[in-house]
Image (tube, rainbow, N blue to C red):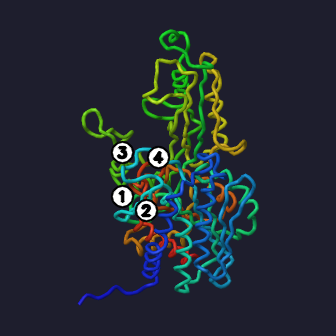
């Protein structure tokens, strides 16, 4: 006779999360993925198109359908700002004055190309436990998982603190619309002692991963102009300098082309000793998977293209604590089919400069602008226009404060209960601007930053997917940590 596993509070949390995901969250996310709700930076007519409004109203309708006792729910709208969902659930723990803030976003990255023939950014497909399509994992699921974690506790009458939710629609653009909302919310947020952010990654799908740092970012357009119109390359090359060659020289001021190392010391910082220790521990878990999991192209010798480094520790530090430059877009160049023998009037690159967690984003943007624009070769017209608004260019990263005893114990217990494996700690190379804002607004609050972006989930790129089994376990783990709040 096979004995059934004992029913525990932790197993009931998992059972509830599994059911809600299967019956309600996955269908809601299928609808969500089908909506091209691109972030304002990628859709200048977002207000007219109404896609952000639609995903917000759909999420609010789902929350309202739960008929939760004591729920306060509203859509906040400021002129010329993308909307924000705000909700409150009163405490069920007696004499508890603390508040847990739960965060996510509903705006998405643009389409990108290279999707599998049967997939697409706005074509949801659920296959082998993976829900494919843009935005489900990054991170449309967050509002649904947050409320499900709260409902799982309330269903079992497990006491918890007051919970508030903040779901924005500008995160993929740098969250520049969010500070005015934080200002008007003011005291309504309460005494925030824990922030739960569901917009991060996981080193694998076998344990709960806590994000310990996030890089900052400066993005913007670098443009080099040499002519007012295109002219015959055969007749005039050698006289007119190439805008692309000038742009290469400017990039060389910033980056060592052979190694990818950023040259200005002001974009670097000393890596904290605790982060070095965590990188070594994480490398011991993930080993070569740190770099082998990438979708490498076939190299000249038939083997895969090689990574910058095959040392797992160095690879982790490169992607979390060291600055890196990526060119993510180009303008001024015709496609190959229409590339005639013409000296083009200009070349423009979209730059994405990832910064160490403790480097100020706005200050770095101004330094980068000066570095690229000063003393232009051939007196060419050079401009670097950073994303954001004056005074708030770029995004500052975040480095977690040391975990308290209760939170350290709680996240490890949640990982053991829901995954059967101890918690892992991982710095992330991505940027969540809100975390730096919240750390400044609530300096005493602790941070539980986690998410479902694990191996090959490929947020921002083709074939993005949400690993649904991991989402279920993460939801139950979050509920368990909330229950452990002292």
| Mark 4 or mark 1, earlier in chain | 1
Residue at the disc numbered 2 = 424
In the foreground, 381 or 271: 381
x and y percentages locating residue 468 in the rendered image: 42, 66
Identify the mark nearer the N-term, 1 or 2.
Answer: 1
Q: Where is residue 191 shown, x and y percent of the image? A: 70, 70
Asked whether the viewer can see residue 216, the reply is yes
**Camera-side residue: 133 or 244?**
133
Residue 285, numbered label: 1
Q: Is residue 467 above or below residue 374?
A: below
Marks 1 and 2: CB-CB under 8 Å?
Answer: yes
- Rounded to the nearest angstrom, the CA distance separating label 4 from label 1 is 17 Å
Residue corresponding to mark 4:
319
Identify the disc placed on residue 269.
none
**Residue occupied by mark 3:** 311
Label 3, label 4: how many angstroms apart (C-alpha)?
12 Å
């Amino acid at each position: 006779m096979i004995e059934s596993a004992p029913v525990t509070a932790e197993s009931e949390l998992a059972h509830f999360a599994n059911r809600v995901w299967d019956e309600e969250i996955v269908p809601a996310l299928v609808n969500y993925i089908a909506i091209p709700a691109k972030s304002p930076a990628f859709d200048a007519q977002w207000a007219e198109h109404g896609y952000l409004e639609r995903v917000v109203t759909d999420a609010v309708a789902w929350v309202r359908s739960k008929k939760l006792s004591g729920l306060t729910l509203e859509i906040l709208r400021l002129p010329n700002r993308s909307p924000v969902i705000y909700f409150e659930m009163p405490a069920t723990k007696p004499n508890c004055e603390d508040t847990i803030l739960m965060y996510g976003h509903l705006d998405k990255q643009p389409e990108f190309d290279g999707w599998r023939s049967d997939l697409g950014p706005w074509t949801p497909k659920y296959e082998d436990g993976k829900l494919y399509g843009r935005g489900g994992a990054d991170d449309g699921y967050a509002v649904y998982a947050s409320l499900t974690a709260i409902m799982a506790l309330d269903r079992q009458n497990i006491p918890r603190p007051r919970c508030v939710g903040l779901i924005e629609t500008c995160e993929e653009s740098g969250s520049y619309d969010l500070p005015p909302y934080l200002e008007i919310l003011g005291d309504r947020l309460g005494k925030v002692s824990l922030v739960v952010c569901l917009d991060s990654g996981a080193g694998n799908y076998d344990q709960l991963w806590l994000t310990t740092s996030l890089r900052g970012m400066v993005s913007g357009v670098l443009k080099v102009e040499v002519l007012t119109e295109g002219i015959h390359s055969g007749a005039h090359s050698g006289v007119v300098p190439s805008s692309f060659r000038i742009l290469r020289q400017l990039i060389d001021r910033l980056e060592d082309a052979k190694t990818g190392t950023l040259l200005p010391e002001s974009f670097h910082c000393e890596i904290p000793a605790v982060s070095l220790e965590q990188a070594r521990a994480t490398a011991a878990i993930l080993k070569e998977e740190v770099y082998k999991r990438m979708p490498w192209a076939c190299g000249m010798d038939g083997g895969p293209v090689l990574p910058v480094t095959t040392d797992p520790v160095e690879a982790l530090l490169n992607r979390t604590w060291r600055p890196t430059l990526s060119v993510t877009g180009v303008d001024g160049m015709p496609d190959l089919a229409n590339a005639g023998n013409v000296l083009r009037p200009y070349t423009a690159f979209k730059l994405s400069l990832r910064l160490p967690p403790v480097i100020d984003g706005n200050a770095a943007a101004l330094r980068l602008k000066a570095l690229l624009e000063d003393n232009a070769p051939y007196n060419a017209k050079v401009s670097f226009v950073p994303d954001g608004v004056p005074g708030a260019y770029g995004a500052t990263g975040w480095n977690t404060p040391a975990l308290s005893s209760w939170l350290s114990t709680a996240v490890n217990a949640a990982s053991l209960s829901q995954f059967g494996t101890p918690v892992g700690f991982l710095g992330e190379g991505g940027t969540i601007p809100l975390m730096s804002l919240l750390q400044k607004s609530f300096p005493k609050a602790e941070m539980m930053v986690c998410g479902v972006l694990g191996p090959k989930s490929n947020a921002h790129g083709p074939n993005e997917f949400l690993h649904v089994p991991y989402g279920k376990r993460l939801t139950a783990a979050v509920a368990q940590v909330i229950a452990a709040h002292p």
